[in-house]
Amino acid sequence: MATGDTYSLACTQYHHLMEGRGMVRVATRDEFVKDPTIVHKGFEAPPRTLTLYPDFKYDGYKWGMAIDVNSCIGCNACVVGCQSENNIPVIGKEQVLRGREMHWIRVDTYYSGETQDPETYFQPVPCMQCENAPCEVVCPVGATVHSHEGLNDMVYNRCVGTRYCSNNCPYKVRRFNYLLYQDFDTPSLKLGRNPDVTVRSRGVMEKCTYCVQRINAAKIDSEKAGRKIADGEIKTACQQTCPADAIVFGDLNDPKSRVAQLQAEERNYSILADLNTRPRTTYLAAVRNVNPEIGE
Amino acid sequence: MPDQHAHDYEDPLAAGNIGMGSSDVIAPGHTFGSVTDKISSIVLTQRTSIGWYLGFLTAGSLAILLLISLAYLSVKGIGIWGNNIPVGWAFDITNFVWWIGIGHAGTLISAILLLLKQSWRTSINRFAEAMTLFAVACAGIFPLFHTGRPWLAYWLLPYPNTMGVWPQFRSPLVWDVFAVSTYATVSALFWFVGLVPDLATLRDRSQSRAGRMIYGMLALGWRGSARHWYRYETAYLLLAGIATPLVVSVHTVVSFDFAIAIVPGWHTTIFPPYFVAGAIYSGFAMVLTLAIPIRAVYGLQDFITLRHLQNMAKVMLVTGLIVAYGYTVEAFIAWYGGNAYEGFMIWNRMTGPYAPFYWALITCNVIVPQVLWFRRVRTNVAALFMLSLIVNVGMWLERFIIIVTSLHRDFMPSAWGLYRATFWDYSTFIGTIGLFLTLLFLFVRFLPMISIFEMRTLVPEAKVEHEI
């Protein structure tokens, strides 16, 4: 029944075309076998020599993440897992309509092909923890800084909330506490929070930390035992929740780690690599085995 | 409309030849005494008109709206505005850049034109400087209150502290702090130093004890001795020298806030010169917006003559053309550079959800001001007033377009969004206009809005003395 009414749907994504920017790279199996570099065509990263500054040195760990677009089924479990692990506030429909959702990881949905029968791609997007992070250089108070293990740390106590970092983040993964989204007073809510993660107040920026609390817990354990953190010992909340095992986290300094091996694959690519941000969260292109007879 | 009270004293001029159509910087027939009488009478002897009270009341109410908006903002957070992710900056920084830009005309008039010995600046420099100061005051509100935690904004200042932490000097926002605070300081000093001899005049002429006390204290013991004048001239010239680079540097640094970032539509090398020209453009528009009603209300057509208005119109024409060149180059490079993000950005500006604002900006800043090529328009006071308002609107739109259209659709299509202003966005902006006008009303009522002693150097008496 047509009522003639209009109703605003509170969405977190309004544009579902990639505009040729190669967020999700796809190839068929045949194409990929013929030329494994096909997923990089047209999206070459600038050479590493285009800088006057020396690279960061990582003597210990060098964290990284690989996300397999092939595996992601778009279930959003990672979003919920992250939300509960990291004390991320639920802000309600009115604030989402204003474009202020607080998710540290989001699952982008892109369509391509025919409108009637489009191809659908899902892409989980956490912080890229860029090696050349555009957010770090513009913060006037040094509230977002490069850690010696490669993370872009957020220092909530130091953040005054200019939002410059978010403006300069090409991936738009940063989230800002535009209002006081946390309820500090209701006693029952206190029990729901993760005691290892800071509860952010209004006026500060926040974003994915690669579950730094889990990294530090594992580091303490390993240091007590006098060993290195084993591969797979740390699972980020999104990784732990993913039913399709699409998210892999680990130490890039260890060439035998799963993440290092995945990042060495031909399918491995970075989003917006042409900006020379050198993300440490990378993606594995989708390779689809199309049946030529039914076209699916 | 000339105010009735403006002619209470004996006007040495016939009503007919008050500067109309003349190319003089001061109408003929004035003497030292008549200049002093005319300007100081506005402060000292004329009765404050009903119009002033009404204007002050209106402006003051809007200034109170600003206080309410800022108080609510401090209690609730930036979320009362429409800003979001991806549009982290919107009205806040638009207003900041707009106000800072407006201030630039004052500095240009008072410093650069002084050094270039442009005597026509004399009658407009005082209130142009006041305008600068008040505009900077309005501008300063935004970077402070747009932060999530304004009570900690002082962390942008480099000061020794127990945390052992400095600002992050690679951030243009830190450069901004230096640029704007230097600008505010120098503008305030320049304005005050220039006022000292006139404050002494007011002290000497004031009929009330309070007036003599207050103006006396502000005049810093000025007696007008040759030694005073010598030191005054040196200090003023030095300040002009210090202020001159600021005309260029402040808006250059403000443009770095954008040019240093990687956002398509911000990351542009043309920004510094284009911002400086835009600043002067909007500043002269604001001087005209203020000067035209003030000269009519207070009957100052003798001092702010058509020559002044024409000269300002010419400056606007030139800077407007530079700004138009900036828009053209922006669009050209977006195409010629072959960068897909840049290309999309300019296309989105021209045809996207904010396209009406873009075309309104082009109309206001590029198309309409071309009428300034015609002398008939440059000498038509009403037309100039209308045009100055249009340019003010256009320059505000320019900053809005640069900030919002660049941010709302940048790199990741999945993160694209829209910005919609809220009541509090408007109330904060209108509130700063209220604050600006309130300060201006107080200024024209309690201080000589035209430099008395500098105007006296323009009358024939002064020239004769000089030649002897």
Image: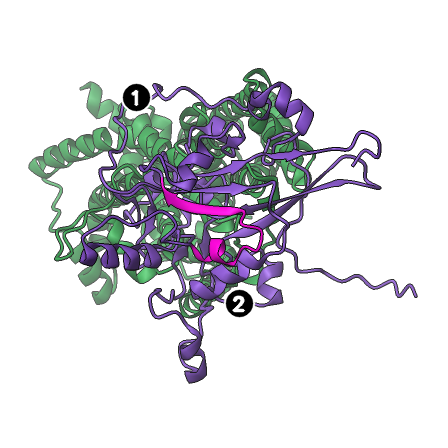
- Three-letter amino acid code at disc 2? Val
Residue farthest bottom in this picture: A187
Q: Is residue A241 magenta?
A: yes
- Residue at horizontal 36 percent and vertical 37 percent from the top: A256
Query: Could you say which disc has been placed on residue B431 in the image?
Result: none
Residue stretch rendered in magenta on the structure = A236-251
Task: Give the percent coordinates (x, y) of residue B375.
Answer: 59, 22
- Indicate the colouring scheme: by chain
Mark 2 in CB contact with mark 1 (< 8 angstroms): no
Q: According to the image, label 2 marks what residue?
A: A90
Q: Is residue A273 magenta?
A: no
Q: Colour of chain B?
A: green
Q: Is residue B6 visible?
A: yes
- Asked which secondary structure carries label 2, the reply is loop
Task: Give the percent coordinates (x, y) of residue A208.
Answer: 42, 52
Q: Which of label 2 and label 1 is nearer to you?
A: 2
Q: Which chain letter goes with mark 1?
A: B
Q: Is residue B123 visible?
A: no
- Three-letter amino acid code at disc 1? Leu
Mark 2 surroundings: few (<14), some (14-19) or many (≥20) residues within 10 A: some
Q: Colour of chain A?
A: purple
- Residue at horizontal 21 percent and vertical 18 percent from the top: B467
Q: According to the image, label 1 marks what residue?
A: B116
Residue farthest left in this picture: B227
Instruction: Give above or below for B173 relative to B218.
Output: above
Q: Is residue A71 left or right of residue A153?
A: right
